[in-house]
Amino acid sequence: MNFGAVQAPSSAMIASALRAMEAALDLRPDDHVLVVGDEVCGACPGAFAAAARSYGCRVTSFELPPSGRPLTAVPADLAALLPGPTVVINAIPAHTAETPFRIAWLNLVEGLGTIRMGHAPGISEDMMTGGSLDVDYRRMRLRENLMLDLLDGASRLRLRSDLGTDLVVDVRGRPFISDLKARPNCCVNLPCGEIYCAPVEGSAEGVLVCDGPIGGDGVPPMPVRIEIRGGRAVAVACDHLIWQERIQRNLSHDQGASMVCEVGMGLNPGARLVGRMLEDEKALRTAHVAFGSNEGFPGGCNCSGMHIDCLVHLPTIECKREDGSRIVVLQHGELAP
């Protein structure tokens, strides 16, 4: 299949895709690249495929079927393409209802331990031309190194915001990692640009007030307050009742869906706040807390068919280290002096 036969990508999109694959996936001319795409992502799948071909790679394209949506499992004909590729690109929608499919596909690919994967749920053409994929990767690495140094030896984090977020999580034994470089057993997002960890399950206590996008559903019309006890979301409040019920339903999808599973911070200088979690969670001066599956994270052991990110703007994050010292990592979203 040739995605470009449906909608041809621009030369700028192809160049941006190639830079991202070189920087985050260590693309090589002898790679076999599988691009999984969907027509709702426009020319994005075709841009990744064309970029890989221009580099000399063998390329296989797979378009998700328009029928039988939302997908809740990996299509058999997609699974049959493994093993074989050395690089996989997922340029697919970010619909919350398809989270079970995406988790199953990620687990299948990462479980092989031989594939470097770029995961782009919700990718759009504007992200690839002047947006969060079209960035200075060297600049991101400098900020990454500084933040990882500040978080070295962390045992506890406290996340606060002016809207009322005040959440404490235990991170002992749970390393902070960045998503700037894929490994065969750990994919990266495209666009990339975050530092994250899987907190100790059951440790989170406090309140999260989300004033950015939630999961793949976009931005609520007003902030959402989530009370967390024993690591789980126990109450959701939002003045917009439709949104409140939607979030409650997603957090009760299964036994693991309400568990705090991730804390992350954005470091992508090109990421904009556009109401799409794939880009928003990478933006500077933001943090995000997720509920649900974290089995693919170092140390993570919570199983769920959901992974629901909740964005917080201008966070203050304080780190308590194992030696008892304390340091402010972010102050209203800015790196602390």
Image (cartoon, rainbow, N blue to C red):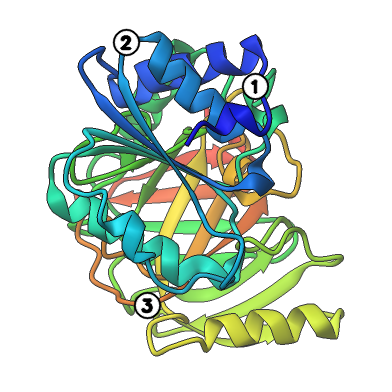
- Residue 89 vertical position relative to residue 129 in the rendered view, above or below: below
* In-image side of 125 versus 78 (left or right): right
The answer to whether one can see residue 36 in this image is: yes
- Residue 301 vertical position relative to residue 147 in the rendered view, above or below: below
The answer to whether one can see residue 142 in this image is: no
Type of the residue with mark 3: Ser
* In-image side of 191 versus 150 (left or right): right
**Between 174 and 13, the one nearer to me in the picture:** 13
Q: Nearer the viewer, mark 3 or mark 1?
A: 1
- Residue denoted by label 2: 56
**Label 2 environment density (alpha carbons within 10 Å; few <14, some 14–19, many ≥20):** some
Verify CB contact (< 8 Å) between mark 2 and mark 3: no
Real-space CA distance between mark 2 and mark 1, rounded to the nearest whole angstrom: 18 Å
Of the image marks 2 and 3, the number of the one nearer the N terminus:
2
Real-space CA distance between mark 2 and mark 3, rounded to the nearest whole angstrom: 39 Å
Rendering quarter of residue 55: top left
Rendering quarter of residue 68: bottom right
Q: Nearer the viewer, mark 2 or mark 3?
A: 2
**Between 298 and 46, the one nearer to me in the picture:** 46
Verify CB contact (< 8 Å) between mark 3 and mark 1: no
- Residue denoted by label 1: 9
- Residue denoted by label 3: 304
| Element under disc 3 | loop
Verify CB contact (< 8 Å) between mark 2 and mark 1: no
